Amino acid sequence: MNLRDREGDPRDLLRAEGVEFDTYGRANQAQRFGVDELAQLAGLPQHDTPRQFHRPRSHRNDSLDDRFVEQLTDLQDARVVAATVAVIEAWAGLGGRALYGSGGETSCFLMARGKEHELGNIWPAAIYPSGKFELVFQHLSVRPPFDAITLREQFRQRLNKLPGVNIAAAKLALRPGFSLEVLADASAREALVEHLAWFYQQAVRQAS
C-alpha cells in the first residue's frame, strides 16, 4: 500500500515519522537523503575508509599532500582553499594528523587515533576537494568513545551551531556533511576548530 491508498494527508503520515515541513509544505532539506546515504542505509559496500589511505601528515612544517591541494585548487576558489588548509593545519596543531586518499579524488581524513592504537583508529571527518566536509557518524558508531550515541549527538548539536549547517538527527548513523564554503567564514571556521578540539579531547581522554 502506498501513501495515496491511505486516507488523510500523506504529509501527516510523514510528520508522524519525524519529517518536518515548512509553511509551503516542503520537506526539510536537511532531512533528505542523498544517493550515498541511501546506499549506506541499504548496506551497500563502502570503500573509502582510512585503511586504504597512507602518508600521515608529519608534525614538521611539511606541505600538505600535493595532489590533494592541486585538486582542491582546481575545484574551489582561493578563499575555500585557504580556509580548508587552515582547518587541516589547526587539526595538526591539536595533535591530530591527516591521511590522504589514493583514489581518483584525493580525500583527507582527520585522524585522532591511528589503527595501531589499542582502541583502533578514529576520525571525525573527511574532506573532499569536490567540496564536501563529511562527518563520519557511521564509522564513529563502532569506535569508542563515540560508539555512545550521546556523544555523537552532542557532536552533531555542536556542528549545527555553525552558520549554514543543519544536520538532521536521522543522519546520526550515516555520513552527512556540509559545503566547504562554510569554512570561508572566519568565525565559522574558528568555531569548527573548537568543535574538532572537543572531539579530539574526547578521543584522547578515552584512550588515556
Image (cartoon, helix red, strand yellow):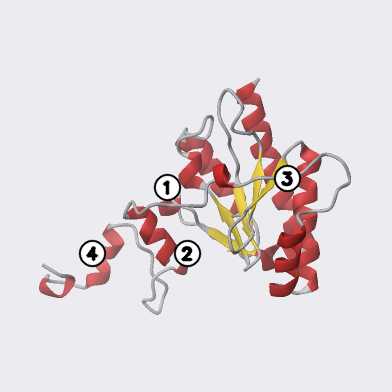
**Could you say which is closer to the camera, residue 153 or residue 69?**
69
Q: CA distance from mark 1 to mark 2?
A: 15 Å
**Could you say which is closer to the camera, residue 101 or residue 8?**
101
Where the N terminus falls, by quadrant? bottom left
Residue under pointer 2: 30
Q: Tell me if 143 is positioned left or right of 38 in this view.
A: right
Q: Residue type at mark 1: give it.
A: Ala
Callout 1 secondary element: loop
**Could you say which is closer to the camera, residue 10 or residue 152?**
152
Mark in the foreground, 1 or 4: 1
> Quick check: can you spot residue 31?
no
Q: Residue type at mark 4: give it.
A: Leu
Q: Residue at x 22, y 71 (%)?
A: 10
Q: Which mark is residue 13?
A: 4
Q: Residue type at mark 2: give it.
A: Ala
Q: Tell me if 96 is positioned left or right of 42 in this view.
A: right
Q: Residue furthest top?
A: 208
Q: Quadrant of residue 203?
A: top right
Callout 4 secondary element: helix
Callout 3 secondary element: helix
Q: Residue at x 80, y 55 (%)?
A: 86
Residue under pointer 1: 173
Q: Are marks 4 and 2 in contact (CB under 8 Å)?
A: no
Residue under pointer 3: 194
Q: Residue type at mark 3: give it.
A: Glu
